[in-house]
Image (cartoon, rainbow, N blue to C red):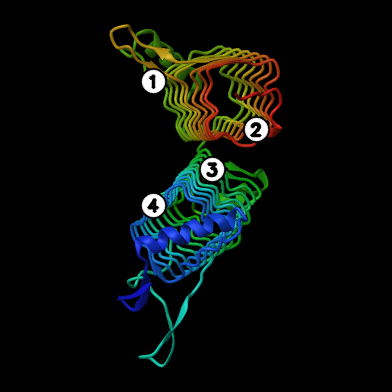
C-alpha cells in the first residue's frame, strides 16, 4: 500500500489486486476457514469502490475514505467505521447492526431500507500524530464535520441505535424504525420523519424544529428540553398523558372539525353529490390533518376523499365504500373497516395497529379496456401490527416494508399480494389461500403460522 496525502490527512492507496486479496481473506475469516484474515483497511482511500453485496462484517475501516462508494446490500454487522468518510455512499439495503459509526460522516449518503439496529452513531473524534505540529491533531475529511446531513434513509432501521449529539438536519427519515433510539441532543431540524416509529425514543434536548412528523408514532418518548417549534405532528400517535406537553411545545397538531367550524353532515352530503356526478357538482372531502377520532362513517361512500395525516383512531368505517381514497400517514389506530369495499386506496405510511379488516375486499380500481391500467391498494410501510384480515379478500395489495407483527389473515384469500421486505413475525396464515404472492426478503417467517414458502 502507498500513501496519498490529500487534504490534511495521509490515506493509504490500495491497488485492485491488494483489495481483492484482502476481501478474499476476509470472507475466509468470516466463514472461519483456515488462512482467513480480518480485513484491516484503516486510513485507506477506497473512494468510489464497488463493494455491492459483499460480507464485510467485523471489518475495520476506521478513518478510511469511502466517498461515493457502493455498499449496497453489504453485511457490515459489528464492523468498525469509526470516523469513516461515508459521504455520498450508497448503503441501501445494507446491514450495519451493532456497527461502530461514531464520528462517521454520512452527508448525502443513501440508507434506504438499511438496518442500523443497535449501531453506535454518537460523536467521535479521530486523533492522528502530526510531525509538522509535533503532537496529536484531529483528523478531518476535507473540513467536513461528522454528520448525517441531507442523507436519504427511507424505511431504515435505527432501533436501539445511539445517535446522541449527531447532526441529521434535512435528512429524509420517512418510515424509519427508531424504536428506543437514543437521540439526546441530536439535531433533527427540518428532517422528514413522516410515518416513522419513534416508540420509546429518548428525545431529551433534541432539536426537531420544522421537522415533518406527520403520522409518526411518538408513544413512550422521553421529552425533556425537546425543541418542537413548528414541527408538523398532524396525524401523529401521541400518549394522551403527554398531549399537554406537545400542545405547549409550539408544534403543529391536528385540529378538530369542531374547532374549524366544519359541519360533517353537510360535508358528507356535498361529497356524495361530487361522487355521483363524477366531480361535476358538489365538493370533494379533504379533511387532511384533522382529528376525526371515533367518527362514524359506517356504510358511507367516501370514494376519492382525502384524509392525509388525519387522526381516525377508533373510527367506524364498516361497510363503507372507498375507491382511490387517500389515508397516507394517517393515524388509524383500532379503526373498524369490517365488510368495507376498498379499491385503489392509499394507506402508505399509515398506522393501522389493531385495525379491523374482517370480511373486507381490498382490490385495484380497474380502468377501461382502452387504458389497460389498474390502481392497486397501497400499504407500503404501513404499521399493521395485530390487524385482523380474517375472511378478507386482498387482490394486488402492496404491503412492501409493512409491519405485520401479530396480524391475522386466517381464512382470507390473498391474490398477487406483495409482502416484499415485510415483517411477518407471529402472523397467522392458517387456512389462508395464497395465490402468486411475493414474499421476497420477508422477515421472521419462522414464527408465522401456516405459512409455507416454496
Q: Nearer the viewer, residue 248 or 414?
A: 414
- Where does the image place residue 331, in percent across and percent down from the top left? 56, 34
- Where does the image place residue 232, in percent across and percent down from the top left? 46, 46
- Where does the image place residue 12, in percent across and percent down from the top left? 38, 72
Does the residue at mark 1 contact the one at mark 3 (Cβ under 8 Å)?
no
Q: Quadrant of the C terminus?
A: top right
Q: Kindly identify the residue that appears in the image at 56 percent across and 46 percent down.
A: 177
| CA distance for labels 1 and 2 | 42 Å
Which dot, 1 or 2, sits closer to the camera?
2
Query: Does label 1 or label 2 sit earlier along the sequence?
Result: 1
Q: Nearer the viewer, residue 43 or 334?
A: 43
Does the residue at mark 1 contact the one at mark 2 (Cβ under 8 Å)?
no
Q: Nearer the viewer, residue 167 or 223?
A: 167
* For residue 288, side relative to residue 426 (left or right): left
The mark found on residue 216 in the picture is 3
Does the residue at mark 1 contact the one at mark 4 (Cβ under 8 Å)?
no
For residue 395, above or below residue 135: above
Disc 4 residue crowd, few under 14, some 14–19, many 20+, Cα 10 Å: many
- Please say whether residue 212 is visible from this viewpoint: no
| CA distance for labels 2 and 4 | 29 Å
> Is disc 1 placed on a helix, strand or loop?
loop
> Which residue has dot 2 on it?
445
Query: Does label 4 or label 3 sit earlier along the sequence?
Result: 4
> Which residue has dot 4 on it?
70
For residue 33, above or below residue 415: below
- Where does the image place residue 136, in percent across and percent down from the top left? 45, 86
> Which residue has dot 1 on it?
284
Disc 1 residue crowd, few under 14, some 14–19, many 20+, Cα 10 Å: many
Amino acid at each position: 500500500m502507498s500513501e496519498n496525502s490529500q487534504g490534511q490527512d495521509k490515506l493509504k492507496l490500495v491497488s485492485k489486486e491488494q483489495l481483492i486479496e484482502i476481501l478474499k481473506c476476509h470472507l475466509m475469516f468470516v466463514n472461519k476457514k483456515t488462512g482467513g484474515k480480518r480485513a484491516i483497511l484503516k486510513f485507506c482511500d477506497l473512494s468510489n469502490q464497488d463493494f455491492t453485496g459483499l460480507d464485510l462484517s467485523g471489518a475495520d475501516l476506521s478513518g478510511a475514505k469511502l466517498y461515493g462508494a457502493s455498499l449496497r446490500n453489504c453485511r457490515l454487522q459489528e464492523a468498525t467505521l469509526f470516523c469513516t468518510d461515508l459521504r455520498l455512499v450508497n448503503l441501501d439495503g445494507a446491514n450495519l447492526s451493532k456497527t461502530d459509526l461514531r464520528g462517521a460522516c454520512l452527508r448525502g449518503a443513501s440508507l434506504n431500507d438499511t438496518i442500523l439496529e443497535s449501531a453506535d452513531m454518537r460523536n467521535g473524534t479521530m486523533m492522528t500524530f502530526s510531525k509538522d505540529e509535533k503532537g496529536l491533531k484531529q483528523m478531518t475529511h476535507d473540513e467536513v464535520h461528522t454528520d448525517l446531513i441531507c442523507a436519504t434513509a427511507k424505511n431504515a432501521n435505527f432501533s436501539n441505535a445511539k445517535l446522541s449529539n449527531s447532526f441529521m438536519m434535512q435528512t429524509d427519515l420517512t418510515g424509519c424504525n427508531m424504536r428506543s433510539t437514543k437521540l439526546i441532543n441530536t439535531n433533527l431540524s427540518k428532517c422528514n420523519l413522516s410515518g416513522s416509529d419513534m416508540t420509546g425514543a429518548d428525545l431529551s434536548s433534541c432539536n426537531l424544529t420544522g421537522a415533518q412528523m406527520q403520522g409518526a408514532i411518538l408513544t413512550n418518548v422521553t421529552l425533556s428540553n425537546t425543541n418542537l417549534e413548528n414541527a408538523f405532528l398532524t396525524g401523529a400517535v401521541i400518549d394522551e398523558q403527554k398531549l399537554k406537553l406537545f400542545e405547549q411545545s409550539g408544534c403543529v397538531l391536528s385540529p378538530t372539525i369542531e374547532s374549524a367550524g366544519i359541519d360533517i353532515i353537510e360535508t358528507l352530503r356535498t361529497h356524495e353529490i361530487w361522487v355521483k356526478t363524477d366531480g361535476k357538482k358538489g365538493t370533494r372531502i379533504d379533511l387532511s390533518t384533522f382529528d376525526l377520532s371515533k367518527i362514524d362513517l359506517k356504510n358511507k361512500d367516501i370514494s376519492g376523499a382525502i384524509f392525509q395525516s388525519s387522526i381516525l383512531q377508533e373510527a367506524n368505517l364498516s361497510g363503507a365504500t372507498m375507491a382511490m381514497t387517500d389515508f397516507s400517514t394517517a393515524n388509524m389506530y383500532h379503526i373498524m373497516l369490517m365488510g368495507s369495499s376498498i379499491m385503489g386506496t392509499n394507506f402508505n405510511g399509515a398506522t393501522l395497529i389493531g385495525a379491523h379488516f374482517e370480511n373486507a375486499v381490498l382490490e385495484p380500481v380497474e380502468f377501461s379496456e382502452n387504458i389497460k391500467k389498474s390502481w392497486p391498494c397501497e400499504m407500503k410501510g404501513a404499521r399493521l401490527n395485530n390487524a385482523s384480515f380474517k375472511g378478507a379478500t386482498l387482490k394486488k395489495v402492496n404491503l412492501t416494508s409493512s409491519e405485520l407483527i401479530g396480524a391475522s389473515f386466517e381464512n382470507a384469500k390473498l391474490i398477487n399480494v406483495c409482502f416484499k421486505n415485510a415483517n411477518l413475525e407471529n402472523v397467522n396464515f392458517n387456512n389462508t389461500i395464497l395465490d402468486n404472492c411475493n414474499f421476497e426478503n420477508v422477515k421472521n417467517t419462522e414464527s408465522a403460522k401456516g405459512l409455507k414458502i416454496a
